[in-house]
Image: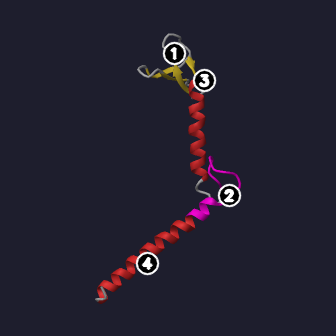
Amino acid sequence: MYVIVDPDVHVAIDPVSGIAAEMNPVQPIANIAELSDRIEEIERAAIDLVDSLNPATVSYPSYPNREGIYLNLGKVSNAVIGFILGLFAVAILLILAGGL
């Protein structure tokens, strides 16, 4: 038994297991094989997003031996933002002092 989520797109869900799948409108059985690859890809992206909160981890599609890349990228982006804010602060001080 399954519940039809959207009859136009032919998506059904099994209420016992919670698995959503594409449904063949001719047969009364949901086809789970077509959606399982997409669901695994979304799960992999969700896990990668959660792992990105830890600066010691590495993203899923990156090259090997790149542990700590988020920490390095955070340092570089903070240095660039600090440099830009420093330039703005100096420019404002020069304008207020009448130097420009």
Specify which label sits upstream in the sequence, 4 or 1: 1
Residue on which disc 3 sits: 33
Relative depth, front residue between 97 and 22: 97
Q: Secondary structure at mark 4?
A: helix
Magenta span of residues: 57-73
Closer to the camera: disc 3 or disc 4?
4
Relative depth, front residue between 29 and 80: 80
Specify which label sits upstream in the sequence, 3 or 2: 3
Question: CA gap, disc 4 to disc 1?
Answer: 61 Å
Q: Are marks 4 and 2 in contact (CB under 8 Å)?
A: no
Specify which label sits upstream in the sequence, 4 or 2: 2
Give residue 86's mark: 4
User: What residue do we see at 41% from left, 20% from top?
Assistant: 8
In the image, what residue type sits under mark 2? Glu
Q: Secondary structure at mark 1?
A: loop
Specify which label sits upstream in the sequence, 3 or 1: 1
| Quadrant for the N terminus in the image | top right
Specify which label sits upstream in the sequence, 2 or 1: 1
Question: CA gap, disc 2 to disc 1?
Answer: 44 Å
The magenta stretch spans residue 65: yes
Relative depth, front residue between 16 and 45: 45
User: What residue do we see at 60% from left, 35% from top?
Assistant: 40
Residue on which disc 1 sits: 24
Specify which label sits upstream in the sequence, 3 or 4: 3
Residue 73 position in % (x across, y down): 57, 63
Q: Is residue 60 left or right of residue 88?
A: right
Q: Is residue 13 left or right of residue 92?
A: right
Residue on which disc 2 sits: 67
